[in-house]
Amino acid sequence: MQQFVDSFVHYLYEEAKDKKTIASYRTTVIHFLEWYEQREGNIIIEETRPVDVKEYISYLKHQCKRKPATINKYIAALKVFFSYLTEIGLIKDNPMNRIKMEKIEYAQSSSQTKWLTKEEQERFISYVELEKNEFKRLRNLAIIDLMLYAGLRVNEVASLELSDIQTKGNDIEITVRQGKGNKYASVLLVQKYSRNLRKWLKYRQRLEKSIHKESQRLFVSERSMFLTERAIQKMLTKYADLANMENITPHRFRHSFCKNLANAGTPIEIIRRLARHESIQTTAIYVDTSREEQMQALRRM
């Protein structure tokens, strides 16, 4: 049993998976194999059938009292595990191919804590546009656009350098050198949403202070060579207070990026790639409609 776990973990490290993901997958695989061994008396992994996995899921649901969202994490880990075993030729028929994720209903309050509605997005931005300080107004609008229309995480925004921004025709290509799990990525900010970033770039080039000229960072503060993640959060809180909005965090803009794509009818696999999610289960929450959205659909009939 241990040899399967060790080789799988080694494979995950070679694939540059996040350490937390590796730890989670390892725990799940061990749990499954221990259950399998206790049930069968021994483990013949290549003989694992879909019905075995279904019984394990039933065990998680009824004996372990796991919630659907947690069960889906187990399923996602086992899908990767058995895909690996198929890839190395240990098994011929992947038993996970017939296993579907558990259906989850997300309550309205749950979805609201994740993303902003279009009206909320516009309301927040309208208060940023009222900023009298030109330096802050141009910079802050560009920061919000990168999170809301390119899906960047706050640490990715804070780490951007001037050389990471390249104009590609009418669009802007952004190089993310230190994404989640230290992964490199190329992200696009399309022409429709690139106006504020273009304005900041022109303004940034005209800054005369030595701390700004010497800095390679895309975003700087008025008194510093760089802008921290904490400073970005404080900036968002400032405008949230003015707009009388609660729980405004950088990640809510990234969530809103994904939800906007889903609302536009974008296929889930494309959303996953644009958001750079490792698991499609992470992306599923944006496609599954909330109860409020279901109610609105009924009222529009």
Image (cartoon, rainbow, N blue to C red):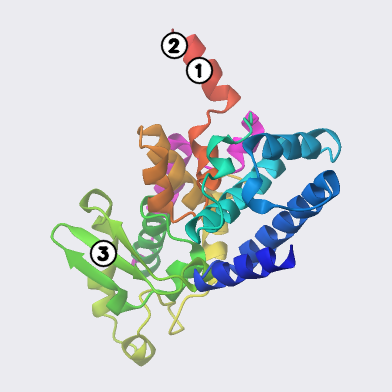
Amino acid type shown at disc 3: Glu
Amino acid type shown at disc 1: Gln
- Residue 161 in the figure: left or right of residue 228: left
Residue 206 x/y as whole percent: 24, 79
What residue is shown at x 52% (from left), y 75% (from top)? 228
Viewer-proximal residue among 165 and 223: 165
- Residue 297 in the figure: left or right of residue 216: right
Q: Which residues are magenta?
A: 106-134
Local packing at callout 3 (Cα closer than 10 Å; few below 14, some 14-19, many 20+) is some
Q: Which residue is mark 2?
A: 300
- Distance from the alpha carbon under mark 1 to that under mark 2: 6 Å
Residue 191 x/y as whole percent: 21, 53
Please name which of the two marks, 1 or 3, marks the residue nearer to the observer.
3
What residue is shown at x 56% (from left), y 67% (from top)? 12
Q: Which residue is mark 3?
A: 173
Residue 230 seen in the figure: no
What residue is shown at x 81% (from left), y 51% (from top)? 37
* Marks 1 and 2 close (CB-CB < 8 Å): yes
- Distance from the alpha carbon under mark 2 to that under mark 3: 39 Å
Q: Does label 1 or label 3 sit earlier along the sequence?
A: 3
Q: Which residue is mark 1?
A: 296
Q: Secondary structure at mark 3?
A: strand
Residue at the left extreme, as displayed: 169
Q: How many marks?
A: 3
